[in-house]
Structure formats: structure tokens, C-alpha cells
Image: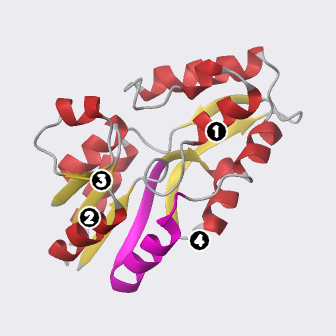
Amino acid sequence: MKLFCADLEGVFLPEVWIEVALRVGIEELKLTTRDISDYDVLMKKRLSILNENNLKIQDIVDVISTIDPLEGATETLDWIRERTQIIILSDTFEEFAMPMMKKLNYPALLCHSLTIDNDGTIKNYNIRTESQKKTAVQAFKNMNYTVTAFGDSYNDTQMILEADNGFFYNPPESVVRDFPIIPVTKNYNEVKTMIESFL
């Protein structure tokens, strides 16, 4: 039995925080796991910026509702789902996810959650479990799945290396340089070719 796991942002959707940064005009919100590999450091910085600028959950959701999938992403995801099972493993949050999932025809998604006050202030983020992408891959392997994983950034490397097979999708040069043993795909046609080689 074969199972595919993929990241969300940078693979099927634009980076949400970059889109938010562009909309609200706060340059520092453009930082992602491509820039800061320590997710806790990155999220604490983001929450601090949101609170300093009095940005609420609805401000973020309003931006997310306008984000469209990357060109060809929905068709590629449908193509994969016609051939095998795929689960999206993301460091996004349940409270952000539904507008994005609708545009991708509701794939299975495992992610984190937020603690939000009654006034919409995002107080904290709640990790589902430490190294959740790697842990999920380990669990699927323990269920006798052969797992292939792909993503674009530092926070995907653990799941890619843990999987039976893995590759990058359109990563930045810094990630390629730091993980030269991981194969790289640059477009969805290359993704399909790679996936077919593992089916």
C-alpha cells in the first residue's frame, strides 16, 4: 500500500504569510520557513508582529479567502488523488485552512491550531505534536504504508528524509545546498513523473 504526503504552502498554494504581509504592508511578515528554519522562533515573531499591529484572526482569514492555488495545483492534486492516496501535512492552522481547502477540492489535511481570544486576538499557536510531519510519516510507515513525501522548505526535510521516498518541489537554493541528497522537481510535470516512478 502506497501513500503520498505533501506540504501545502509553496507546493499547492502561495505562502500565506507572504500574502498577508503584502496586504497589510508589514515586510517582516514575509519571513517563512525558507528564511527561518526554527518554527517556534518564526511563529513567536509572527504573533508578536500581529499583536503589535492589532491584527486579528479575521484580518488573516480575509486575506486567505482571496488566495488562489498556484497555477496547475488543483489539477495536479486531482491527478494524484485519481492514482493514489495523498495527505497534506502542513504547518498551517485549522483556523486558516477551510478557505484554502475548498479551492483544492478538500484534500485530507493534518495541521496545527491556534488559541484565539473572544475579540479575535491570536494569543498562541498549538503544535499538534513535535516534528508533526516526521511523526505522521513514521506512523504511516508503522501501518505498513510505503510513504513518499515532498515539500519545498526546511520544515519538510524531516518528513522527506523519514519517508521511503522523497523529493523537493521548487525549493530555494539555500535548501538545495543544505540538503544535496534530496532530489529536486521544478514544476508539476516533473512532480507527476516523479510520482509515477514510485507507483
- What type is the residue that disc 3 sits on? Lys
- Foreground pick, 158 / 179: 179
Task: Identify the image quadrant of residue 30.
Answer: top right
- What type is the residue that disc 1 sits on? Glu
Q: Which region is colored magenta?
A: 70-90
Question: How far from the left and from the top, in percent, is residue 16?
Answer: 60, 42
- What type is the residue that disc 4 sits on? Tyr
Residue at x 47%, y 25% (from the top left corner): 40
Q: Residue furthest top?
A: 52
Q: Determine contact: label 4, label 1, CB under 8 Å.
A: no
- Which residue, given by chain and number where applicable, does mark 3 sit on? 186
Q: Earlier in the sequence, mark 4 or mark 2?
A: 4
- What type is the residue that disc 2 sits on? Glu
Distance between the Cα atoms at labels 4 and 3? 24 Å
User: Marks 4 and 1: which is nearer the front?
Assistant: 1
Q: Determine contact: label 4, label 3, CB under 8 Å.
A: no
Question: How far from the left and from the top, in percent, is residue 165?
Answer: 17, 60
Residue 19 - label: 1
